Amino acid sequence: MQLIKMHLIDADKRYVWHPYTQMLDWMRWDNKVIVDAKGFYLIDSKGKKYLDGIASMWCNVWGHSDNEVLKSMSKQIRTVPHSTLFGLASAPSVILAQRLLMLCKGMQKVFYSDNGSTAIEVAMKIAVQYWHNKGKRKKKYFISLENGYHGDTFGAMSLGYLPKFFRPYRHLLLKVYKAPKPRASDQTTADDSNSDLEDVEKIVSEHKDSCAALIMESGAQIAGGGIIYKKGYQRRISELCRQYGLLFILDEIATGFGRLGNMVEYIAQQSRPDIVCLGKALTGGYSPLAVTLTTEEIYNAFLGQYKDGKHFSHGHTFTGHAVGCAAGITNIELFNKYKLIERIRDNAHYLCKRLKELDSPIVSNPRQKGLFAAFELKQNNKPITIMQNNENLQYFVMHESMKMGVILRPLGNTMVVIPPLAISRRDLRRIMDVQMCLVKRIEKECK
Ligand SMILES: Cc1ncc(COP(=O)(O)O)c(C=O)c1O
């Protein structure tokens, strides 16, 4: 067994192309292959344990050991692993839809897809076809916020254009008007966001006749550097969309399901979307499933005679995958059963306290909401991206945290805390201890 596991490390380097990774660097690294898990820990082929400090790219809720969500998934696999939603319905997809619509007030229909990016593509297509079906065919472009991120497929890249990632594809991207990015704040700051909003209103009013919708992340921009919206900011943009006749699409893929301390972030933000995208924690982080929710008003615009072609031409092989839906149903039940939102809020107070203890001249703008925190590392007001020994900061944090038994992944020079949502206080403490230790080491390096 040991021999086979050792081979896995070499086979990974030989055969697997990793996401967002310079593979030449990967070849030099002591790569880890995960073969087992216990609680919130992942275990590699050499038997070393790592606390999953990034919730397996921000989606894990309950950890990695056997639990009720996994049991319901294996029960579903034994019953019907997958049957299509093309021409048929499946029990788990019906039940999950019902449960989601009970949570997501104002939404009345659920369209299933496989991951966050495809949920965004679905939202874009629905928005454009909504206006097309209503005879307003000029309304076909989008407005999004600078610095937003919505996924890696072409539509999603167009909305969340980050030059650092997407420059080679720029010539193929769709026309999207950019409203200025929100200014960073913590959620307790009073509503003083008027100047941000004046600029958004300018773009919205200017392009209202050619745009189908405005899209933004709900509650905070995460991948674009962790900007938590000021109070009232999202609500006001929702009102602007209504005022100027644009659909309002909210991307809750990273921020929904408790990440910011609320089960449904758009409700907490007192905003009124027409379309909402969910993914990541929807299934507890166990299955590639995502949803695009819409209002009845949107859905009704797709009704008509078949020959009129008003129906929505979209679907994936695994749309509404039964195992993912079974996971989603149990996941929502467990949020209630274990009062997870209360636990998240409790841990959020602790996270806030620990963030205040970050006492270092290189730490800039620490901020937090729910189980999300971020701060920048800067020296002389400039981002620290390369350390004095010429090492890339992101690599340094990833490798040194692993040596300390915790998986961390900063976003450039922004350190982020995005743990599994049901993490214990003890494990959260460990993540913060390692973050603090790394900050001190980077501070020393920068002297
Ligand atoms: C806000 C947001 N939208 C969309 C996506 C894309 O989701 P996926 O990676 O599942 O395609 C992400 C991924 O991180 C995200 O953070």
Image (cartoon, rainbow, N blue to C red):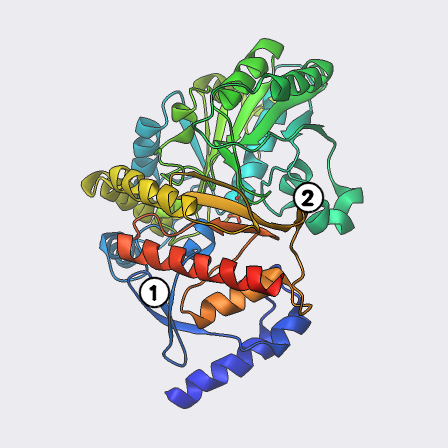
Depth check, front residue: 143 or 324:
143
x and y percent of residue 429 in the render? 33, 55
Q: Residue at x 52, y 69 (%)?
A: 399
**Circle 2: residue type:** Leu
Q: Find residue 410 and report its image quarter.
A: bottom right
Residue 241 seen: yes
- On residue 168, the disc is none
Q: Amino acid at mark 1?
A: Tyr
Q: Is residue 73 above or below residue 233?
A: below
Residue for badge 1: 41
Point 66% across, 70% down: residue: 389
Q: Is residue 213 left or right of residue 267?
A: right
Q: Helix, strand or loop at disc 2?
A: loop
Q: Residues within 10 Å of mark 2 (few under 14, many from 20)?
A: some
Q: Which mark is residue 162?
A: 2
Picture quadrant where residue 105 is located = top left
411 and 38: which one is in front? Answer: 411
Q: In the picture provided, is 23 more to the left or to the right than 184?
A: right
Most extreme residue toward the left is 337
Q: Secondary structure at mark 1?
A: strand
Quadrant occupied by the C terminus? bottom right
Q: CA distance from mark 1 to mark 2?
A: 32 Å
- Say if residue 133 shows up in the picture: no
- Residue 178: x and y in percent read 70, 29
Q: Residue furthest top?
A: 243
Query: In the image, is residue 388 above or below residue 294?
Result: below
